[in-house]
Amino acid sequence: MVAAAILRRTPGSLASAIRLHRTAAIATPIARFMSTHVTNAACEDNEPGFLGSVETFYDRAAKISGVSDKSLTAIKAVDAVLSVKFPVEIDADTHIIIEGYRAQHSRHRLPCKGGIRFSDEVDLQEVEALASLMTYKCAVVDVPFGGAKGGVKLNPKKFTPAQLERITRRYTMELCQKNFIGPGVDVPAPDVGTGPREMSWIMDTYRQFNPQDVNAAGCVTGKPISQGGVRGRNEATGLGVYYGVREFLQFPEVQKMTGLDGNIAGKTVIVQGFGNVGYWAAKFFQNNGAKIIGIGEHDVSAYDPNGIDVEAIFKHRAEKGTFRGFGNAEIIDGSIKVMERECDILIPAALERQIGLKNVKNIKAKIIGEAANGPITPDAHDYLVSQGKVVIPDLLLNAGGVTVSYFEWLKNLSHVRFGRMSRKWEEAGKSKLLTLVEENAGRQLTPQERRAVIHGAEEHELVYSGLEDTMIGACEETRATAALKNTDFRTAALVNAIQKISTVTTQSGQMFL
Ligand code: NAD
């Protein structure tokens, strides 16, 4: 059996390396710039990779943040990286070696938090970039976690569910052994290629290794409800994207820049990536009156200026495996070209580096809402901003996922469904009040009217309410800093994140950074 792991810890600027070798040890090369064709297609060779882009955006914000150089250096560094290779039995005669990573960018607040990605694109620089973004994202929405991210290099479509289960459990075992998972240490969640099913396997495996941990359910979020998940997590990122764009549309400065009015209703929207985030974002935009005119997937895109029914195209793709043959929609190869069509709002919701110097000049949307992490390179971002377009940045716009993951984690630690203790009590109180009002007003409410007023919140309503409040607050804060610093919304969101993280690390004395 061959298995090896490298654990690299870089506390602040003091880089130290600890290597863990088991059985026949192999030194895994730390690949830094390995993005493949999917994440390179829109970019020129001289544009930075994903990690380089995140660092470029960070450096810009750092300069105007007013935070000391010492803190800025410490905040930027990726704290710890786990790199593993492990064998998995594919059938009776075959073992394959799987590569996996987990990066903890910051532990200024614990646990660390961030998704696990299953994709051919996964490499160490992608995981480090995503972990860094998670730290800044949590700070932007005041979620008290450090940032982390995990990745397993594989295409989940090429494996059976039983094989994926073995891989997921084996990867989780590595996380358990190296102390890279736990409700107070590091809490994964879904990302590209993973969902509630994988989160269930992760929790179950963690539980086997930690049978005494009463809070084991809090070791991972995005679980099915039956496994301790919270209602509303599935759709949270897409819903947060919708709330965020809705808020920005209402800002007078955004209306001035774009010439759009403040309503979602009637706006034309194109979405790239029709997975968890893209599907739910499209659905919320459509439910609130927007017209979805284009949806891009990895093979082809569907485009129809008269509007695409989100549920109908979802069912079509689930049955046929492609958008081809859907209604009257024009079918376009790939997903880059559809993003170049005329629309009000473009939502990249697939992968990083989808808008770069090769295609940015063709982007016609007035608002680009980054539902994916890192979809726009720094040079492309600057070009869009120079053209008066509004870019709502990933670390703000897709923070709905981690916000509701935070709610799920709280639910797991408190071991009780939100609203369970208070719902009936609140309904009884409101009912008494209504009776008094009825007596004084001399009019009885109809049973429907009474029910509508006294209705106590269900779990998903509380989650939606907490998410909406969080997104509104974070959008307002970003907007205020953009105005104060006379800068774009991405830099503003990063300035806010850096200042908040710096306050925590400085007030903690910084000894253990
Ligand atoms: P997912 O795996 O559910 O969906 C991704 C979709 O994009 C898939 O349908 C896939 O076929 C499609 N895709 C892949 N390559 C493509 C390409 N080149 N062009 C068009 N489509 C392509 O993943 P997801 O969870 O929806 O994540 C999407 C993005 O949102 C990622 O950047 C992820 O990091 C980010 N994100 C996800 C969450 C979350 O809660 N899931 C939270 C925050 C950010």
Image (cartoon, helix red, strand yellow):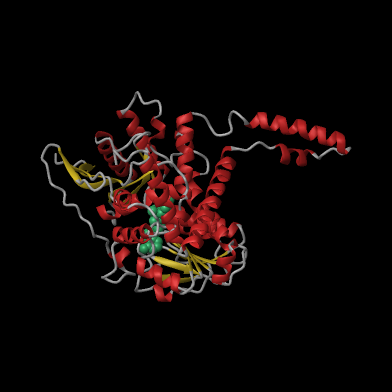
Residue 212, by quadrant, is: top left
Q: Residue furthest top?
A: 212
Q: Quadrant of ligand 1?
A: bottom left
Relative to 59, is 279 on the left or the right? Answer: right
Relative to 83, is 113 on the left or the right? Answer: right
Q: Residue furthest left?
A: 24
Q: At which x and y percent is residue 272? A: 44, 63
Asked whether residue 161 appears in the rendered view, the answer is yes
Asked whether residue 370 appears in the rendered view, the answer is no
Nearer-the-camera pick, 180 or 478: 478
| Count of numbered marks | 0
In the rendered image, which quarter contains the N terminus? top left
Q: At which x and y percent is residue 204? A: 36, 33
Q: Residue furthest bottom?
A: 361
In the rendered image, which quarter contains the C terminus? top left
Q: Residue at x 47, y 56 (%)?
A: 397
* Placement of 477 over or under 47, stated as above or below: above
Q: Residue furthest right?
A: 442
Q: At which x and y percent is residue 422? A: 62, 30
Q: At which x and y percent is residue 65? A: 40, 56
* Placement of 427 over or under 382, stated as above or below: above
Residue 370, by quadrant, is: bottom left
Nearer-the-camera pick, 224 or 367: 367
Q: Residue at x 29, y 55 (%)?
A: 126
* Placement of 376 over or under 146, stated as above or below: below
